[in-house]
Image (cartoon, helix red, strand yellow):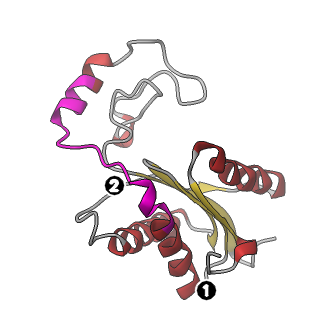
Amino acid sequence: MPRWGCCWWHLVLHTKGSWLHGDPRGFRTRDHRIHSSGDYRDPPPEGEHHGLHCYQRDQLKQAIVIPESLFEIVGMAVVKKCGKSDTPVLAVSVGATHAHVLVELRNDYEWAKEYTRRLKVASSHAIRGRMPGNIWARGGKPIAVRDRAHQLRVYRYILEHTRHGDWVWDFRQGDSVG
């Protein structure tokens, strides 16, 4: 049960170049000026917006991929940032192109977006000696957790990322990694 005035949020951070306009998994541009007919769960028809995806990929200088040796550093930076601001966090996963965070924040979408930005800054700073510059894509869409069943699904989903080789942390570990 979240604190009064708060709710649980599923924050997803993508690295630069990991999800481009025209992506075969589905996409939407800002204000939905262009969007595909599907999403990652129900992909659009093959080849839809293929030209746009090729153009975006060609314009990209370099897609950012986080090396496995930095997963834990990025993840612990997120956990520590939450701890410093007394923000309850249940689970974090970090992979090569994205991270997931299940965190309790004010029941305010704009605040959740701002908090996501702060987590991106903290984690980028933690590895800037090895990966200078911004690693995270701009924007993102925090997802408000609707109820306890949804919270448990998100929690399990994040923990299952160990099967993909991602680094995973949950609240039972505290703020240190054994």
Task: Reply yes or no: does residue 61 show up in magenta.
Answer: yes
Per the image, label 2 sits on a secondary structure element best described as loop
**In the rendered image, which residue does mark 2 sit on?**
138
47 w.r.t. 63: above or below: above
In the rendered structure, which amino acid carries the disc numbered 1?
A: Asp
Determine which quarter of the picture holds residue 22.
top left
Q: Residue at x 22, y 43 (%)?
A: 62
Q: Which mark is residue 96?
A: none
| Quarter the C terminus occupies | bottom right
**Quarter of the image containing the N terminus?**
bottom right
Q: Nearer the viewer, residue 152 or 80?
A: 80
> First in sequence: mark 2 or mark 1?
1
Task: Answer whether residue 85 is visible to the viewer in this image.
Answer: no
Which residue sits at x=69%, y=54%? 159
Q: Find the magenta span and give its range.
A: 54-72
33 falls in the magenta region: no
Residue annotated with mark 1: 86
Is 15 in front, or is 177? 177
How many residues crowd around disc 2 within 10 Å: few (fewer than 14), some, or many (20 or more)?
few
Identify the residue shown where x is 65% and y is 44%.
163
**Does residue 114 sit above or below 152 in this rendering?**
below
Locate residue 130, reporting x and y percent. Answer: 28, 66
| Helix, strand or loop status at disc 1 | loop
Spot occupied by residue 89 in the image (x, y as percentages of width and height): 65, 72
